[in-house]
Image (tube, rainbow, N blue to C red):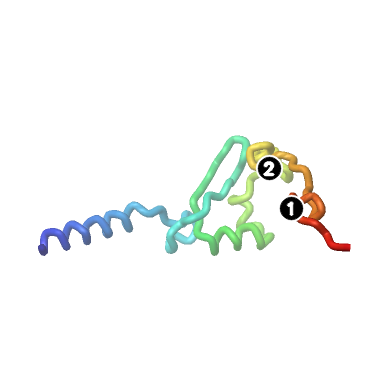
Amino acid sequence: MPELLQSCRLKRELKLLNMPVCQHCKIEIASVNHHISYFPEKIIKLCIRCHKVIHKLKLPMYDKYKQYKKGDSSFFYGKKFKKPNRKKRFWLDIPGYERCI
């Protein structure tokens, strides 16, 4: 039984060691991929807090994390994330729905 507990503990510790750490603060577990540039593609791992700070604050010290031009992200993602055009449905178009007048 103790061997089983040790193996479970070892697995947990290895899992924690293999988790990516934020490349900005080096403290929290990274959960977001951040594009430094899109062309050529450079990505770093950041925690949510650092990612928000980098995008919200317009300080020169964060310029090294934003080396892309305006519009690069929309060109990069382009059609990959766009939903296909769908016909808008109104409440009168729903089958089985009859409006009482």
The percent coordinates of residue 34 (x first, y second) are 56, 50
Q: Secondary structure at mark 2?
A: loop
Residue at image position (75%, 51%) is 94
Residue at image position (69%, 60%) is 58
Residue at image position (18%, 57%) is 7
Closer to the camera, 76 or 93?
A: 93
For badge 1, the amino acid type reads Gly
Label 2 packing within 10 angstroms: few (<14), some (14-19), many (20+): few
Q: Secondary structure at mark 1?
A: loop
- Above or below 30: residue 74: above
The percent coordinates of residue 9 (x first, y second) are 22, 61
**Residue corresponding to mark 1:** 96
User: Which quadrant: the N terminus?
Assistant: bottom left
Is the C-beta separation of discs 1 and 2 under 8 Å?
A: no
The percent coordinates of residue 17 (x first, y second) are 31, 55
Left or right: 84, with 88 as reference point: left
- Above or below 72: residue 12: below
**Residue corresponding to mark 2:** 83
Determine the image quadrant of residue 86: top right
